[in-house]
Structure formats: structure tokens, C-alpha cells
Image (tube, rainbow, N blue to C red):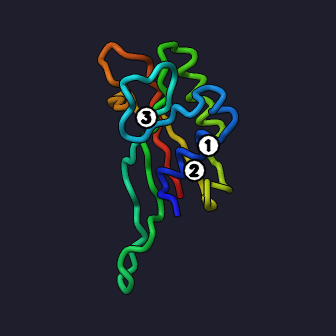
């Protein structure tokens, strides 16, 4: 059975609207230096477990990810971010090899420091927080 992060990547690359913008350029953690073009970066930012005193922690209730749409073109960056929000926010249903109860997308505040870019003079970044239940 796949990890939630693997399922998120699968969900993004198999969505036709998102794939039309970035193809398979969806990366967790590290982005290859050789990447050319637009891409999505994501990293796990938190896990909320359901805790029951008699049983301890049970499978995660929710997993949060920082998700970044990245492009050298500002308009294209915003298109990618819009596609992520449109196709993922308030989504419920098939999620790779399982079913998700809900995905919710929120924009990051202005004090968020992008992590998916590899240079200070790099591309535009639209940063979001994605929570998966």
C-alpha cells in the first residue's frame, strides 16, 4: 500500500488539467538541478494522528503538505496554482490506490519561505498548504 505522499504525487500527475501544465514534473523533497520548465514541489509539513488511550496512535487522521507551483513565468505559475486549487480543494474520492475523505487547499501567508526552488534568483513560486484527511 502506498504512502500518502506517493498517493498525492499520483493524484497530481494523473489529473489531466495539472498534467497539461507540468507533465510528470512533480517532486517530493528534492528537485533535480537539471529540471527544465515548470514543476510542482511538495514536502510533508505535519501529521495529525487520532489517539485513543486504550489503543495508542491509530493511522493518521490528516497529513499536511507544503505544495509549491513553480515557473519562470508569473502567469504560468498562477495557472499551475489555480489548477491545483481547482482540482484538489474540497476533493473527495479516489486517491491512487485508496479513497480520500477530503483534500483541502489553503494559500500560505506572505511570511512562508519557499523550499522547492534551488536558487535565490529563481522562478516565481505560488505556495499552498494541502491537508489530506
Furthest residue to the left?
Answer: 120
Q: Nearer the viewer, residue 3 or 114?
A: 3
Of helix, strand and loop, which one carries label 2?
Answer: strand
Mark 1 closeness class: few <14, some 14–19, many ≥20 residues within 10 Å: many
Residue projecting furthest to the front:
34
Count of numbered circles on the image: 3
Which residue is denoted by mark 2 in the rendering?
Answer: 103
Do tag 2 and tag 1 residues touch (Cβ < 8 Å)?
yes
Instruction: Give coordinates of residue 114: x percent, y percent.
Output: 36, 29
Q: Is residue 55 above or below residue 28?
A: below
Q: Nearer the viewer, mark 3 or mark 2?
A: 2
Between 86 and 95, the residue placed more toward the observer is: 95
Q: Earlier in the sequence, mark 3 or mark 1?
A: 1
Q: CA distance from mark 2 to mark 1?
A: 6 Å
Q: Secondary structure at mark 3?
A: loop
Crowd tier of the residue under label 2, counting other residues whose Cα lies within 10 Å: few below 14, some 14–19, many 20 or above: many
> Which x, y percent locates residue 10?
57, 46
Q: Secondary structure at mark 1?
A: helix
Q: Residue at x 53, y 58 (%)?
A: 133
Percent of width and height locating residue 37? 51, 19
Q: Residue at x 39, y 57 (%)?
A: 47
Q: CA distance from mark 3 to mark 1?
A: 16 Å
Disc nearer the start of the sequence (2/1): 1
Any mark on residue 88, and which? Answer: 1
Residue shown at 52%/22% (left/top)? 38
Task: Indicate whether 117 appears above or below 106.
Answer: above
**9 lies left or right of 96:** left
At label 3, counting other C-alpha atoms closer than 10 Å, the crowd grade (few under 14, some 14-19, many 20 or more) is some
Residue occupying the point 35% across, 82% down? 53
Mark 3 sits on what residue?
Answer: 108
**CA–CA distance in space, label 3 to label 2:** 16 Å
User: For the residues carrying marks 3 and 1, which lies nearer the camera in this image?
Assistant: 1
Amino acid at each position: 500500500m502506498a504512502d500518502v505522499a506517493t498517493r498525492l504525487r499520483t493524484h497530481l500527475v494523473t489529473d489531466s488539467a495539472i498534467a497539461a501544465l507540468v507533465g510528470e514534473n512533480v517532486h517530493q523533497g528534492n528537485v533535480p538541478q537539471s529540471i527544465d520548465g515548470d514543476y510542482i514541489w511538495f514536502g510533508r509539513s505535519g501529521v495529525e494522528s487520532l489517539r485513543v488511550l486504550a489503543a495508542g496512535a491509530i493511522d493518521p487522521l490528516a497529513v499536511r503538505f507544503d505544495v509549491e507551483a513553480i515557473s519562470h513565468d508569473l502567469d504560468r505559475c498562477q495557472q499551475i496554482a489555480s489548477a491545483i486549487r481547482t482540482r484538489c480543494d474540497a476533493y473527495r474520492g479516489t486517491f491512487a490506490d485508496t479513497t480520500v475523505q477530503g483534500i483541502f487547499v489553503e494559500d500560505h501567508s506572505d511570511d512562508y519561505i519557499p523550499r522547492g526552488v534551488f536558487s535565490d534568483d529563481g522562478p516565481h513560486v505560488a505556495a499552498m498548504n494541502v491537508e489530506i484527511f
